[in-house]
Image: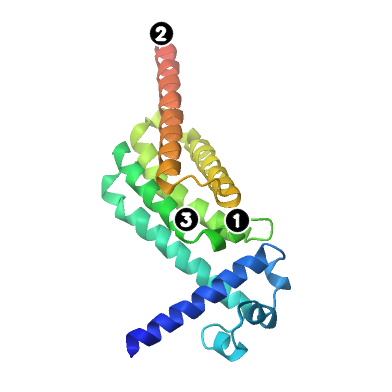
Amino acid sequence: MEKKTDRRIRKTKSQLRQGLAKLMEEKSINEITVKELVEEVDINRSTFYLHYTDIYDMLEKIEDELMEEIKYLLDATEEQIGKPQASLPFLVELFSMLDHNRDICRALSGPHGDLSFITRIEGYIAKHSAKYTNSLFNSSIESDMKYIHSYCITGCVGMVKLWLNENYGDSPEHMAKITYDMLIASLQSYLKESSKKNLHLLD
């Protein structure tokens, strides 16, 4: 009976989340009412209030759940810092997670989405990736690392938004490989040029 109840709760929350994602493609979160949402998904208002206090509480809980998934994936690769090949499996998992939550992720990153949430994700990934990139570059370019991180993450976020919104049908594995190849190529190119510059200064 408990498992059946859990399934029912998951189904209800999934319906509400899909409905919220659909409405957020048309309007901002402060324009969406509980009444409008429950009518969209054909659920009683009382059922909504069993899980959330209001629309803002619902959005916050959804964002926290997504953030926890991302943190879990990043923390799982912590011991692989310094090993470039470890990045590809992580990216596959990340794109798979985004694909599984495509509707709400598309809404959150869209014109009516939550920019602060996207910035929060970028900041966390930047902090994590810094451990990897710092192991590649020497201390002479430490002051430039913030720009390297920004360049890589901004590019990745742009790719993710395009993939989520246009839905070209490319698989998470395909997107992970493209992202991995571009990141490695960019970092290796910068590392090569930086090494040349350092050698020139020593002449």
Q: Is residue 145 visible?
A: yes
The mark that comes first in sequence, 2 or 1, is 1
- Residue found at x 55% / y 72%: 17
SS category of the residue bearing label 3: helix
Q: Residues within 10 Å of mark 2 (few under 14, many from 20)?
A: few
Q: Position of residue 144 (x, y in %)?
A: 50, 33
Q: CA distance from mark 3 to mark 1?
A: 13 Å
Q: Quadrant of residue 183?
A: top left
Where, quadrant-wise, is the N terminus in this rendering?
bottom left
Q: Residues within 10 Å of mark 1 (few under 14, many from 20)?
A: many
Which of 152 and 13 lies nearest the eye of the viewer? 13
Q: CA distance from mark 2 to mark 1?
A: 48 Å
- Residue found at x 37% / y 30%: 138
* Residue at the spot of label 1: 109
Amino acid beneath label 3: Asp
SS category of the residue bearing label 2: loop
Which of 107 and 39 lies nearest the eye of the viewer? 39
- Residue found at x 46% / y 33%: 182
The mark that comes first in sequence, 3 or 2, is 3
Q: Residues within 10 Å of mark 3 (few under 14, many from 20)?
A: some
Report the residue that reaches farthest toward the top: 203
Which of labels 3 and 1 is toward the front? 3
Amino acid beneath label 1: Ser
Which of 144 and 57 lies nearest the eye of the viewer? 57
The mark that comes first in sequence, 3 or 1, is 3
* Residue at the spot of label 2: 203
Q: Position of residue 168 (x, y in %)?
A: 55, 45
Where, quadrant-wise, is the C terminus in this rendering?
top left
Measured along the vertical axis of the image, is residue 40 above or below residue 177?
below
Q: Position of residue 126 (x, y in %)?
A: 46, 47
